[in-house]
């Protein structure tokens, strides 16, 4: 069994955060009996820092116990650090990637890895990605944009050029939505996270990124958000509006079949629909381990497809 959506934080990165807490406004808050401290960066997106996030042997043991034979390990979105000066973001990214590379290389039979990059400075992000790939990582996990700019914006071209040249995996992982209307009852996560993926993925289609950089292998979290389930509307918009079709060479439905998707959906009929729409080879097993909202162990999917995606 494979898992293409899993997160880990090297202890050296946590040590950096503690030593430089004043730079990124890192806080640890104890909430309730039996809970690990909750980590927040810059007052945002706090999460329980469970031992499985950083204790290597525990992480590996839980993979084995769950029957996961190979895992694609990613940095956590809370540590993208895009809102800070890009020099600081790059410093932490290099540290994170170096440590994750060592972890993966030491466990090459059961682990592959993705880098984090300073998306707040795309030229530097390109260089960090190139270095990470040279160290044995498979690509990068990134957020859906930066500072209100989506990933089809020209400023991100250096990153896409590097990803395309390296045939890298680019895992689009959303951050929590900040729309003030939904800042309650976990809605920033429940609907905000898949909404961010939806906006990002549609922008990549309409902005021509999939045609310009066809060798980048784009993986969408959480079943592609809401995008696959409104494909009829997108196809109809393509037929009637030049603003939709002007940069495209085919209907939106065809572009959906160029993405890869994890199967973190918790609903068998939704998963069946996704597979029917994009093909079994595009839907990969994932878990979002060890966050609270995970599917553990991963729902069954094509191991052959996951192996081919990872180049194993």
Image (cartoon, grey):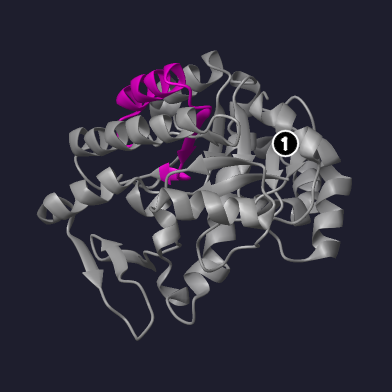
In percent of the image, x 17 and y 55: which residue is there? Answer: 18
Which residue range is magenta in the image? 120-145
Percent x, y of residue 186: 49, 76
Q: Residue at x 79, y 47 (%)?
A: 301
Residue lying furthest right in this view? 276
Residue 32 falls in image quadrant: bottom left
Q: Give the quarter of the image for residue 169.
A: top right
Residue 130 forms part of the magenta stretch? yes
Query: Where is the N terminus found, in terms of image quarters?
Result: top right
Viewer-side residue, 297 vs 134: 297
Please count the marks in the image.
1
The x, y position of residue 210, in whole percent, is 64, 27
Question: Could you tell me which residue is drawn at 48 percent across and 34 percent down?
Answer: 114
Residue 167 lies, with reference to residue 284, above or below; the image says: above
Who's the residue at 62% across and 39% down the image?
219
Q: Quadrant of the C terminus?
A: top right
Is residue 269 located in the magenta-colored stretch of the structure?
A: no
Residue 5: x and y in percent read 59, 48
Which residue occupies the extreme top position in the image?
165
Answer few, some or many: residues within 10 Å of disc 1's Cα (few below 14, many 20 plus, some between 14 and 19).
Answer: many
Residue 252 in the image: above or below residue 215: below
In this view, 171 is above or below 221: above
Callout 1 secondary element: helix
Q: Please say whether residue 262 is visible from this viewpoint.
A: yes
Q: Quadrant of residue 65?
A: bottom right
**8 to the left or right of 21:** right
Q: Is 39 left or right of 230, judged from the image as shown? A: left
Residue 71 % position (x, y): 60, 42
- Comparing 63 with 43, the one in front is 63
Q: Which residue bears the numbered disc 1?
A: 306
Q: Report whether residue 8 is seen.
A: no
């Amino acid at each position: 069994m494979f898992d293409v959506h899993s997160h880990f934080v090297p202890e050296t990165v946590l040590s950096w955060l503690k030593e430089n807490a004043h730079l990124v406004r890192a806080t640890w808050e104890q909430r309730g009996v039996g809970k690990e401290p909750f980590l927040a960066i810059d007052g945002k997106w706090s999460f329980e820092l469970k031992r499985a996030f950083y204790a290597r042997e525990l992480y590996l043991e839980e993979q084995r116990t769950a029957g996961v034979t190979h895992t694609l390990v990613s940095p956590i979105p809370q540590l993208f650090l895009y809102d800070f000066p890009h020099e600081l973001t790059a410093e932490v990214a290099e540290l994170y990637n170096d440590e994750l590379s060592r972890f993966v290389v030491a466990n090459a039979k059961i682990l592959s890895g993705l880098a984090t990059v300073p998306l707040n400075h795309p030229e530097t992000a390109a260089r960090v990605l190139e270095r990470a790939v040279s160290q044995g990582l498979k690509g990068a996990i990134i957020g859906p944009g930066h500072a209100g700019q989506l990933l089809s914006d020209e400023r991100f071209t250096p990153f896409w050029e590097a990803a395309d040249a390296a045939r890298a995996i680019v895992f689009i992982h959303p951050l929590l939505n900040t729309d003030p209307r939904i800042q309650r009852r976990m809605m920033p996560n429940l609907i905000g996270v898949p909404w961010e993926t939806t906006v990002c993925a549609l922008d990549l289609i309409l902005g021509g990124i999939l045609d310009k950089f066809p060798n980048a292998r784009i993986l969408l979290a959480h079943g592609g958000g809401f995008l696959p389930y409104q494909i009829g509307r997108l196809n109809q918009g393509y037929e009637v509006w030049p603003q939709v079709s002007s940069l495209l060479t085919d209907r939106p439905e065809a572009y959906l079949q160029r993405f890869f998707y994890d199967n973190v959906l918790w609903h068998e009929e939704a998963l069946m629909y996704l597979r029917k729409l994009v093909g079994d080879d595009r839907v990969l097993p994932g878990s979002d381990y060890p966050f609270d909202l995970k599917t553990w162990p991963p729902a069954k999917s094509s191991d052959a497809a996951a192996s081919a995606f990872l180049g194993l």
